[in-house]
């Protein structure tokens, strides 16, 4: 995996995590009740921006798929879980239990083994 592909892959993962973060912020501002919910989703800058980031991430993903094996790329996506955990902790003040930290360690070990 060359430097450009590593940078693109990390950009892809960050775009996914930031997109999900924006969706969470937007979803927390919406009242989920019937058709009004659809309008709120369409009009929410948080939801729309998160969607745009997902579109950009998808184009990066398609490029990476054309250059690298799926059996390498797909497992490496689990890095997004780790970034999301830290965002949950830092931005949303979520409490991360020890078992979840253990899970992060297992994911990191898995990423290391897949990338090796």
Image (tube, rainbow, N blue to C red):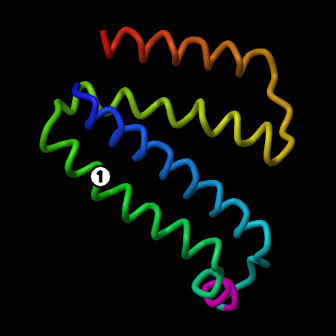
Q: Quadrant of residue 105?
A: top right
Farthest front residue in view: 3
Expressed as whole percent of the image width and height from the top left, the position of residue 102 reads: 67, 12
Instruction: Say whether residue 78 is left or right of residue 63.
Output: right
Give coordinates of residue 40: x percent, y percent: 67, 85
89 to the left or right of 80:
right
Looking at the rendered structure, the secondary structure element under dot 1 is helix
Magenta stretch bounds: 36-40
* Residue at 36%, 27% in the rendered image: 75
Q: Is residue 78 left or right of residue 33?
A: left
Residue 25 in the image: above or below residue 31: above
Horizontal relation, residue 96 to residue 63: left or right: right
**Above/below status of 8 relative to 103:** below
Q: Residue at x 56, y 34 (%)?
A: 81
Residue drawn 55% across and 65% down?
50
Quadrant the C terminus occupies: top left
Viewer-closest of 11 and 3? 3
The one of 16 and 41 positioned closer to us in this rendering: 16
Which of the 4 image quadrants contains residue 89?
Answer: top right
Task: Give the image location of residue 114, x and y in percent.
Answer: 33, 15
92 or 33, nearer to the observer = 92
Q: Which residue is mark 1?
A: 60
Position of the N terminus, as image quadrant, is: top left
Q: Position of residue 31 (x, y in %)?
A: 79, 78
Residue found 80% across the figure and 40% down from its top = 90
Q: Residues within 10 Å of mark 1 (few under 14, many from 20)?
A: some
Provide the major secondary structure of the magenta segment. helix
Res 20 → quadrant = bottom right
């Amino acid at each position: 995996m060359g430097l450009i592909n590593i940078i693109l892959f990390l950009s892809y993962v960050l775009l996914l995590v930031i997109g999900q973060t924006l969706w969470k912020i937007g979803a927390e501002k919406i009242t989920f009740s019937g058709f009004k919910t659809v309008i709120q989703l369409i009009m929410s800058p948080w939801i729309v921006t998160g969607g745009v980031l997902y579109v950009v991430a998808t184009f990066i993903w398609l490029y990476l798929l054309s250059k690298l094996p799926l059996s390498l790329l797909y497992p490496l996506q689990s890095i997004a879980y780790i970034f999301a955990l830290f965002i949950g902790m830092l931005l949303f003040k979520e409490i991360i239990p020890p078992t979840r930290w253990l899970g992060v360690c297992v994911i990191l070990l898995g990423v290391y083994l897949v990338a090796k």
